[in-house]
Image (cartoon, rainbow, N blue to C red):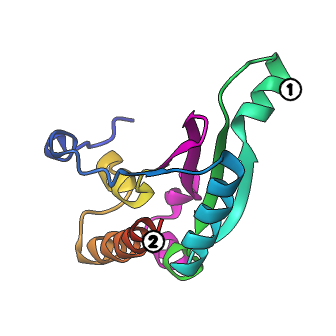
Amino acid sequence: MTLPIDPSLIESGDIGEKRATLEMNHEAAIEHTRETFADAGFGVAVEFSVSDLLAEKIGADRDPYYVLGACNPEVADRALDECIELGGLMPCNVVVREVEPGKQEVYHLSIMRVARLLGLAEDDEEWADIVATTGELVDEAFENL
């Protein structure tokens, strides 16, 4: 099955990427990010250290890299009503990675925009509202990082 990808979305970079740099240690950045996203209406459904997991499983030596699986239940419920396949992209991951000691990057990619880009979600008014709602919540979190 070929998915109908809109090339204009790819060219415009309309995938909802956000980045922030935090001047603090890795553990403090994880906690700060968790609290900031909670204040913006997100719970953390899943979280894990990718770097610890890879070290344990294959002996990889990576800089600290942590994933917070954030979710706003009301928006997730609305989104699943419109696009049941969205579960394949859930939760909304927020990455906290150490770029150097005392300096962390927080990264997020909008699964709602990606679902539209991949053709999983309809490019209609309801989906546009879901994208806008999640965008506002993520913007609030990033403004407070």
82 or 76: nearer the viewer: 76
Indicate the quadrant containing the N terminus: top left, top right, bottom left or bottom right.
Answer: top left
Of the residues shown, which amino acid type is indicated by label 2? Asn
Say if mark 1 contacts mark 2, CB within 8 Å.
Answer: no
Left or right of 109? Residue 4 is left
40 over 22 or under it: above or below: below
127 or 51: nearer the viewer: 51
Left or right of 48? Residue 106 is left
At numbered mark 2, what does the secondary structure look like: helix, strand or loop?
loop
At numbered mark 1, what does the secondary structure look like: helix, strand or loop?
helix
Of the residues shown, which amino acid type is indicated by label 1? Glu
Residue in view at x 72 percent, y 32 percent: 51
Q: Dot 1, how many residues are within 10 Å of its Cα: few (below 14), some (14-19), or many (20+)?
A: few
Residue in view at x 52 percent, y 50 percent: 23
Q: CA distance from mark 1 to mark 2?
A: 34 Å
Q: Earlier in the sequence, mark 1 or mark 2?
A: 1
Which mark lies nearer to you, 1 or 2? 2
Region in magenta:
77-106
Residue in view at x 74 percent, y 47 percent: 48
Taking the magenta stretch, the answer to whether it contains residue 98 is yes
138 over 90 or under it: above or below: below
Q: Disc 2 marks which residue? A: 144
Taking the magenta stretch, the answer to whether it contains residue 74 is no
24 over 57 or under it: above or below: below
Q: Disc 1 marks which residue? A: 56
Residue 125, numbered circle: none
Q: Dot 2, how many residues are within 10 Å of its Cα: few (below 14), some (14-19), or many (20+)?
A: some
* Quarter where residue 74 is shown: bottom right
Left or right of 82? Residue 131 is left
Percent from the top left, x then y, of residue 88? 57, 51
Percent from the top left, x then y, of residue 63? 65, 29
